[in-house]
């Protein structure tokens, strides 16, 4: 009987449930990723042009350009992410219902977006910097011997960037997710002005997590986050 319960606890949900929130997730990732890469290339080229501020400091150029690209992309990602989280967490039964909930609470959306910047901007900076540095290192290392512009090589560099960025930004991801879904079950709106609704901003939420779970609470889901972002990037 105990053995059966153990097996049952590890059972996967039906396949269709694994794709809950697929549409809002596509809307979240596709346009924002296009903006991210386009803005990154534009800013990086400007920062590393002859006579530009970071001409001799490529690492800083990668970090700044990646951060700027991610900031721009996050502006259109925020509503889609809030919609996706509501569908996947069961707070809404469809993307349309979830999006309606998001529009009903613009202050909560703004709070979630502003807090997500602490996660997305560093993630955008780190992932592309690791990608560029790993590629540059292999180019300058004769013993590497492989074509760094091949699909497998670039996929490996991207996976490394996604892995490092995902791990480093997991605490901010935990805080952001808590803000997005905070107080829904009690019917309490999360207000940007810090009203009497409980957890309302990044500092308040971080303090609550620290009190509840200690430092380890900031790394809940780190393996799954890394598993998602490494192949995605």
Image (cartoon, grey):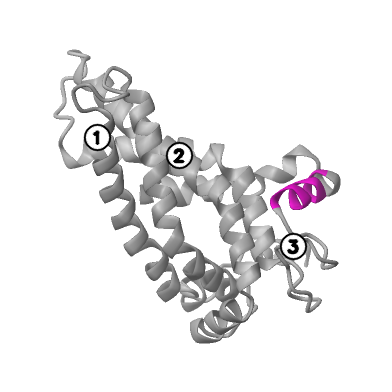
Q: Position of residue 24 (x, y in %)?
A: 44, 73
Left or right of 144? Residue 173 is right
Q: Residues within 10 Å of mark 2 (few under 14, many from 20)?
A: many
Of 61 and 218, the residue lying toward us: 61
Which mark identifies residue 193? 3
> Residue at left 74%, top 62%?
193
Nearer-the-camera pick, 119 or 230: 119
Q: Which residues are magenta?
A: 202-210
Q: Residue at x 74, y 45 (%)?
A: 217
The residue indicated by pointer 1 is 46
Residue 161 visible (yes or no): no
Position of residue 37 relative to residue 97, above or below, is above
Q: Nearer the viewer, residue 2 or 97?
A: 97
Element under disc 1: helix
Q: Could you say whether the residue bearing mark 2 is in a helix, strand or loop?
A: helix
Which residue lies most toward the top here? 142
Q: Is residue 209 above or below residue 82?
A: above
Q: Position of residue 8 (x, y in %)?
A: 67, 68
Tell me the residue at 73%/61% (across/down).
3
* SS assignment for the magenta stretch, majority: helix
Quarter of the picture containing the N terminus is bottom right
């Amino acid at each position: 009987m105990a053995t059966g319960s153990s097996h049952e606890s590890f059972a996967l949900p039906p396949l269709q449930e694994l794709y809950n929130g697929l549409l809002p997730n596509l809307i979240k990732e596709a346009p924002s990723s296009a903006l991210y890469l386009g803005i990154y290339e534009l800013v990086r080229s400007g920062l590393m042009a002859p006579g530009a501020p970071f001409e001799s400091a490529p690492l800083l150029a990668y970090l700044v350009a990646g951060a700027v690209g991610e900031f721009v992309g996050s502006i259109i990602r925020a509503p889609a992410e809030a919609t996706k989280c509501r569908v996947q967490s069961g707070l809404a039964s469809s993307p349309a219902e979830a999006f309606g909930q998001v529009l009903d609470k613009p202050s909560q959306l703004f709070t979630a977006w502003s807090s997500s910047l602490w996660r997305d901007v560093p993630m955008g900076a780190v992932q592309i910097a690791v990608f560029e540095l790993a590629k540059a290192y292999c180019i300058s290392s004769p013993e590497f011997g492989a074509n760094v512009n091949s699909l497998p090589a670039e996929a490996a560099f991207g996976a490394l960037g996604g892995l490092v960025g995902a791990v480093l930004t997991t605490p901010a991801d935990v805080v952001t997710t808590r803000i997005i879904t905070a107080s829904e079950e009690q019917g309490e709106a999360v207000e940007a002005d810090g009203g009497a609704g409980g957890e309302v901003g990044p500092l308040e939420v971080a303090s609550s997590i620290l009190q509840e779970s200690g430092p380890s609470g900031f790394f809940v889901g780190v393996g799954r986050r890394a598993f998602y972002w490494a192949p995605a990037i």
